[in-house]
Amino acid sequence: MENYYNLLGIQQNSSSQDIKRAFRERAKRLHPDIAGKGGEAQMRKLLCAYEVLSDRERRYEYDRAYSRSVKHLDFDYRVFLESQTEDPISQAKLVFFDLLHRDEEQALCVWWAQGGLDFPMERYLSREDWMDCTFILAEELEKRHGYYEAFMLLVRLVREERREPYFRHFMSDIEGFLKELVRLRLKSVVDEETYVTCIETLLELGFSSRDEARWMRSMAETLMHLGKLDAAQRVFREALKRDPALPNVVQLRRKLKV
C-alpha cells in the first residue's frame, strides 16, 4: 500500500497546513515545464495523496488501512484476491492491484476473464479507484491495439468527469488521448456501422464545435460508403453548421451534392 506521507515528504502527525504546503512544493517540481511528461504519473500519485490526506475522514480511513497493512506484511493480499474467483469485488480489486504493481498483462487477463467491457468495475471499486483503474486499463489496451475497448473506457471516463470532476488537471490529456484514438486508430479496427455508432456516442459528450464538425465529416463519409446517402447529407450539413470553414470537404460536397 502506497505511503502517502512519504510521497508528500511529511510526518504522520502533520497538520492540514503542512500537507497543503508540502503538496504545493512538490507539485511545483512536477510541473510539465520542469519534469516534462515523465512527471505526469508521479503528479497523479501526488494528487491522490493530497486529496486523501487533506480530507479528515478519508485520512482517518487511510491511516487505519495503512496501519493494518503494515501489521500484516506476511499476508499476501494478491494471493487472497486471486483466490476469490467468485467474488467480483475481489476480482475488480485484483485488476487494480496488478495495474498499480506493473503487472499489466495479468490485470488484463483478469479483466477479460470477468467480461472486459461488460465487467462493471464501477460497482465494486470506489469512484476514484475506478476512474484511475479505467484510465490505466485504456492506456494498456491502446498499447496492445485494443483500440475499441480503450475508446469505450475513455468515453465512460469523460462522461463521468462531465458529471462530477475528478481528474481536473489531467482531463485535457485524457480528452487528447480519446481524440487521437478516434483520429488515428479506431476506424481501422471496427466495421463501418460500429464506427458510426462510436461517433454518435462521442457527439453526446460535449466537445468543441470544431472537433464535432470533423467527426461528423468522417461520419458522413462512412454513411456514404454504407449507401445511406440521406443520412450522410444530414450529418454533413450539420458538420458545416458547426464549422463553416471545415477543411477537406470539396469531394464530399460534390459526391453528396451539398
Image (cartoon, helix red, strand yellow):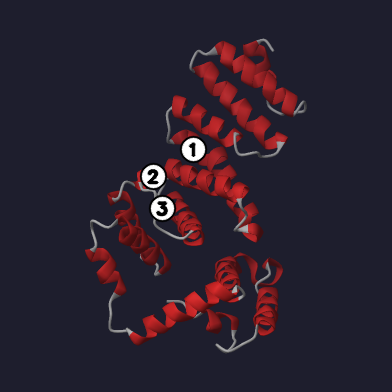
Q: Quadrant of the C terminus?
A: top right
Q: Secondary structure at mark 2?
A: helix
Residue at 47% in and 47% down: 153
Above-or-below relation of 195 to 62: above
Spatial CA distance of label 1 from label 2 is 16 Å
Q: Residue 150: x and y, percent?
A: 46, 46
Residue at 58% in and 73% down: 46
Q: Residue 25: x and y, percent?
A: 69, 80
Above-or-below relation of 92 to 214: below
Q: Secondary structure at mark 1?
A: helix
* Image quarter of residue 29: bottom right
Viewer-closest of 246 and 243: 243
Q: Quadrant of the N terminus?
A: bottom left
Reading the chain from its start, which is encountered first: label 1 or label 3?
3
- List the residue tagged with mark 2: 117
Reading the chain from its start, which is encountered first: label 1 or label 2?
2
Q: For the residue carrying disc 1, how many other residues have a C-alpha within 10 Å: few (<14), some (14-19), or many (20+)?
A: many
- List the residue tagged with mark 3: 123
Above-or-below relation of 221 to 46: above
Q: Residue 82: x and y, percent?
A: 26, 64
In the picture, the disc for residue 186 is 1
Residue type at the position of mark 1: Leu
Spatial CA distance of label 1 from label 3 is 27 Å
Reading the chain from its start, which is encountered first: label 2 or label 3?
2
Residue at 53% in and 49% down: 157
Q: Secondary structure at mark 3?
A: helix
Q: Are marks 1 and 2 in contact (CB under 8 Å)?
A: no
